[in-house]
Image (tube, grey):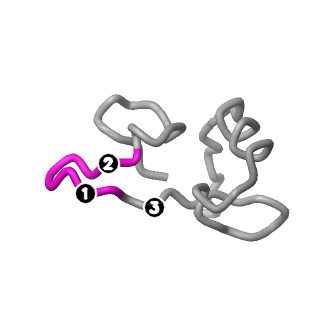
Amino acid sequence: MRLPKSGRPLHSEEDSMATRCNARTEVYARVCGFFRPVQQWNRGKKEEFKDRTEFLVERKTND
């Protein structure tokens, strides 16, 4: 996932603006196993999206 300059995940409409050209971007996230534009989610799923906790998982490589 790519973070905006603020360093935090995209959670709101104002966060979904491109930094260089100020154009609106589409934010996709996974819900029920499928990636869908957050803008198309129902109100309840949008609220759940705001409450999500993001974390990084380190991959162990077989060297």
| Residue at 80% across, 42% down | 44
User: In front: 50, or 57?
Assistant: 50
Q: Earlier in the sequence, mark 3 or mark 2?
A: 2
User: In front: 57, or 39?
Assistant: 39
Residue 27 coordinates in the image, percent (x, y): 50, 57
| Residue at 39% across, 38% down | 14
Residue 28 coordinates in the image, percent (x, y): 56, 61
| Residue at 21% across, 46% down | 19
Q: Which residue type does callout 3 highlight?
A: Glu
Alpha carbon separation for disc pair 3 and 2: 9 Å
Q: Which residue type does callout 1 highlight?
A: Ala
Residue 36 coordinates in the image, percent (x, y): 65, 67
What's the magenta region? Answer: 16-24
Residue position for label 3: 26
Residue 49, quarter of the rendered image? top right
Residue 50, quarter of the rendered image? top right
- Are the residues at dot 2 and dot 1 in contact (C-beta closer than 8 Å)? yes
Residue 37, quarter of the rendered image? bottom right
The relative height of residue 16 versus residue 11 in the rendered view (above or below) is below
Q: Residues within 10 Å of mark 2 (few under 14, many from 20)?
A: some
Residue position for label 1: 23
For the residue labelled by badge 3, is the local secondary structure a helix, a strand or a loop?
A: loop
Alpha carbon separation for disc pair 1 and 3: 10 Å
Q: Which residue type does callout 2 highlight?
A: Met
For the residue labelled by badge 1, is the local secondary structure a helix, a strand or a loop?
A: loop
For the residue labelled by badge 2, is the local secondary structure a helix, a strand or a loop?
A: loop
| Residue at 67% across, 68% down | 35
Query: Which labelled disc corresponds to residue 17?
Result: 2
Magenta span: predominant SS is loop
Q: Residues within 10 Å of mark 1 (few under 14, many from 20)?
A: few
